Image: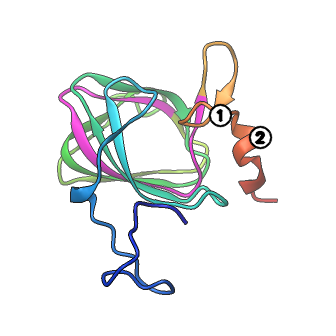
Amino acid sequence: MDAVTPKGPQTSDTHSHLVQPQNMEWQKTRFSGCEAKTLLFDRTTGLMTALMRFAPGSVLPDHEHVNIEQTYVLEGSLVDKEGPAQGIACKSGEFIWREPGSRHAAWCPDGALLLAMFQVPNKFFEADGRVVDAAGADWDETWGHTRKS
């Protein structure tokens, strides 16, 4: 599993892995106004936990949660901009989770700091018909193996 997890006195190779987000740099994503600190990432299964920071007005475009997604809002709010739950707002101190197969666009009108947990990376639907992951890679080629049989 990946994360910026240094080996040392605070980490055990076989047990606990201390991650110190305060010592990590924010990484830009391909989504304008969205940055992330990846705390845990399993390249085989797609399991991921990340701190995500959104500038005011940032939009996370049309995407589907392949498996359950969980988000705890630390600051600001996360609002369903489009989709069946349009208008639902998860505010600071609140938690929202989304069922497998749920699809929407989300935005952060006043900005936000989130703790997001994904079982498998989201599918993003591009205007040209491609279905990609958050990095822009073809979803089926990269993550198709994670689908349950």
Considering depth in this image, is 8 or 70 the residue closer to the camera? 8
Residue placed under numbered mark 1 in the picture: 137
Q: Which quarter of the figure is the C terminus placed in?
A: bottom right
Considering depth in this image, is 123 or 13 the residue closer to the camera? 13
* Residue ranking furthest to the right: 149
Q: Position of residue 127 (x, y in %)?
A: 61, 13
Q: Are marks 2 and 1 in contact (CB under 8 Å)?
A: yes
Is 106 placed above or below 129 here? below
Q: Which quarter of the figure is the N terminus placed in?
A: bottom right
Q: Position of residue 40 (x, y in %)?
A: 45, 61
Q: Which mark is residue 67?
A: none
Residue placed under numbered mark 2 in the picture: 141
| Amino acid type, callout 1 | Ala
**Is 18 in the magenta?**
no
Q: Main secondary structure of the magenta part?
A: strand
Considering depth in this image, is 102 or 134 the residue closer to the camera? 134
Crowding near pointer 1: few (<14 within 10 Å), some, many (20+)?
some
At 37% from the left and 25% from the top, the residue drawn is 59
* Residue ranking furthest to the front: 8
